[in-house]
Amino acid sequence: MSAVVRSRPWLLTLIALAVLVAVNTALQPSFVQPAVLQSNLTTFLPLTLVAIGQTYVVMGGDIDLSVGAIAALVNVVTVSAIAAVGGDGLTPIIAGLAAGLATAVVCGVINGVLVAVLRLQAIVTTFATGIVFAGTALFVLPQAGLPVPEAFWRSYGATLIGLPVVLWILLAGLAFALFLGRRPFVAHLTAVGGSRVGAFQTGLSLSRVRIGAFVLSALFAGFAALCLTGETASGDPLLGQSLALSSISAVVLGGTALSGGSGGPVGSILGALVLGMIGNVIFFAGLPFAWQTLVQGLIVLAALAGGVLVTRR
Amino acid sequence: MTPGEAATAAGGQDAALLDAQGVGKRFGAVVALSDGRLRVEAGEIHALLGANGCGKSTLCKVIAGTVAPDSGTIAVGGDVVQFRNPRDAEQAGIALFYQELSLIPQLSVAANIGLGREPRTGLGFVDRRRLNSEAEALIALFAGVAGAELKPEAIVADLTPDLRQIVEILKVLARRPRLIILDEATAALDGRQSARLFEILRARKAEGVSTLMISHRLDEVFAVSDRITVMRGGATVAQLVTAGTNRDQVVRHMVGDARIHPVTSQRMPPALAEPRLTAQGVRNARVHDVSLSLRPGEIVGLGGLQGQGQSALLQGLFGALPFTAGRVTIAGETVALTRTADAIRRGLAYVSGDRGRDAALTGRSIFENLVAALLVREKRRLVRPSELDPLATRHADSLNTQYAGLDAPIGTLSGGNQQKIFIARWLATGPRVLLLDDPTKGIDLAAKGDLLAIMRKLADEGASILIYSSEDAELIEWCDRVLVFNSGRIVTELAGPTLDHFHLARAAYGEAA
Ligand SMILES: Nc1ncnc2c1ncn2[C@@H]1O[C@H](COP(=O)(O)OP(=O)(O)OP(=O)(O)O)[C@@H](O)[C@H]1O
Ligand SMILES: [Mg+2]
């Protein structure tokens, strides 16, 4: 049992999620209706995506505090690009998506180079770049606004082959995580996070691996930003401010150690869903909103303590 | 690296496989290497010897591309090379066994062995089947002498020190180098495991592969090496042919004019006092029903093959791997040893040879590493460094540890000097019972002599000492009696005339002595 949990700590997260789903359904019987599920998923999806990306950075022994700011920047770049191209049809949307995701990649490379090549401390560096990215977002779009074309948000809320698009996006994220998990990259990332010295001595290129992780993190923050854009249908330079810390909470809840070298994105997906469900349960149990943050904090604390106890065997 | 270009350094066809000249390297104020010279021919086993901190590991890391030299040239097969990283060296056919191991604790044995060169499937996925079967084939090299826990799927962090060391060896072999560099690869291996390693190296030698081995065990150096290079204080001082030299000569080169304690013990018959420590029928995961009694002033050895419960017994007594059954008394009083802090306060001290896992406060200063145990013993909460400084300095110096200053990070010390700090840490607590778990791993001859002298002095002052060593010679020379372990049980006790290599080996392999 303990060996199973040690190699798959997310099993505990899965159990917690099942319990929360059961409690939520008891409190709110309509929870299982497709429309309600879809709206819940729409709410949880951005954090889930950011958490997937954050996992790679944490596995490599770093941390990315700039994901919220990256999401905001990608959002305003996307809506601005769409507005700049103008016109109808798909062209402006595609231009917007491309500009947004390219921005994300640039942000990730900047973070990665500062941390892995210039060897600045990840927590301080991404805190600072986060401020810079947020400032740039305000520069690009000083005030919330700039509606996106109807086709954008309509397709985000639509269904595809009988399933909502948001579910397809979640499944795509999961599929990507599983795909990458079998590539050598994740083994190298685990090695870099587990022992920097050992990984270097083995001949791995530390900077390439770490920059790769930061780019993935930024890219997933970009995907989250596009989802938020689909949800709000407009630009907002202040969006996603809680994403950084919530994504780290989700990563921890999913069984990835903050010290690096273990864990994986599947757990973080579950962790993000658990965080979202806690909010739901508190809402439907009629507890004051202030409880939500408090309970989430306590649960993350418990997960951190539990992780330490497990590794101490 | 341009292997195509004409040879310039050694020239011609008699170019050595490796030729390093005038290699220098400083770390801040510390000169680790001033004039490292080394010439290894194809198809030879070459030993690199020298006292702790003389620069052996640094020279090897320069050759393997891990450390950039400040000066000097390195030529491989006659071509001058400049490695930017370990990958360059690997491509030139050089692979290094790191003294402090380069393994990733969280990964499996197979993943560690294949790290960075994983076989892939058509989709670019890691081919786990092939990864595991390649590891399996390598593990088979140590079949019969390594524990059954050594499996491709085993997580490295769960392995015992000897098995981790074997994994590091396999990782080197998996890279199929032309030059295998082993930086104290036998330090945690027992006699059979080392013998197997040397068999493998001889087989590789027949295929033209060379080995550069660093060792503080002169027996094995004289048994397997063809030539010897000796370093002292950062420079190469002698290049010898093994068959044409002897131990005395080698040791003189190693220590220069310095005085060296003879590594023998004047045995004093232990006083017939009440036992200091007794254990009756104790058990834990790896110890099955062991009873023993230690008198004050006694040095008792634990012998046998690697991993037969010797470490588990010591860790049990220290409360790190608590006993599940049996009784332990200290000075006649029954005690429950379930936490190391209790053991420390009862006057027990435990020196582990597995410094990476058990001992090092990585990233912390030498001073913090030194006084860690003392603070627990004295239940101190507040530390005034000025008060502890002289004590720390005295104990660090007692084994001639070389260090730049007490506030330097522990990682800047050479492997052997780190180990001396961990021994000194426990000497500082003035222990009544000293538990030594392969304490001499990686320390040089002079320090071994000093350690023995200190052990003798502690024993003469009334301490009891229980020591496990993977080197039989130490047990024979140092101990009053030796308890030989097999499968978690004491099978024989050897003392006096029967305490010799022959009886020890026979008892270890399970025949009645
Ligand atoms: N990273 C480092 N920073 C500072 N000093 C270092 C560093 N690495 C090694 N040194 C110093 O360089 C000297 C040579 O160390 P090295 O590890 O090469 O010794 P060694 O011959 O391998 O000794 P041992 O037998 O104890 O392993 C030592 O004095 C050590 O303290
Ligand atoms: Mg060394």
Image (spheres, coloured by chain):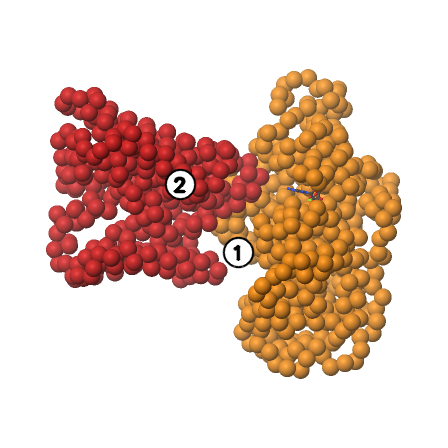
Residue B154 appears in the figure: yes
B61 sits to left or right of B504: left
The answer to whether B177 is drawn above or below residue B316 in the figure is above
Output the chain of dot 1.
B
Instruction: Give the residue displayed 73% in from the left and 45% down from the top.
Output: B53
Residue B241, located in which quarter of the rendered image?
A: top right
Instruction: Give the residue displayed 38% in from the left and 44% down from the top.
Output: A55
Mark 1 nearby-residue class (10 Å; few <14, some 14–19, many ≥20): some
- Checking the image for residue B158, the label placed there is 1
Q: Position of residue A113 (x, y in %)?
A: 45, 32
Q: Is mark 1 within 8 Å of ligand 2?
A: no
B32 sits to left or right of B103: right
Helix or strand or loop: what does disc 2 sit on? helix
Mark 2 nearby-residue class (10 Å; few <14, some 14–19, many ≥20): some
Output the chain of dot 2.
A
Q: Colour of chain A?
A: red
Residue B353 appears in the figure: no
Could you tell me the amino acid type at mark 1?
A: Asp
Residue A146, located in which quarter of the rendered image?
A: top left
Q: Position of residue B336 (x, y in %)?
A: 57, 76
B230 sits to left or right of B139: right
Q: Nearer the viewer, residue B435 or A138?
A: A138
Q: What residue does disc 2 label?
A: A127
Residue B391, located in which quarter of the rendered image?
A: bottom right
Q: Mark 1 or 2, which is nearer the eye?
A: 2
B53 sits to left or right of A77: right
The chain shown in orange is which? B
Q: Position of residue B474 (x, y in %)?
A: 76, 60
Q: Nearer the viewer, residue B487 or B258?
A: B258
The answer to whether A256 is drawn above or below residue B390 in the figure is above
Could you tell me the amino acid type at mark 2?
A: Phe
- Quadrant location of the C terminus of chain B in the rendered image: bottom right
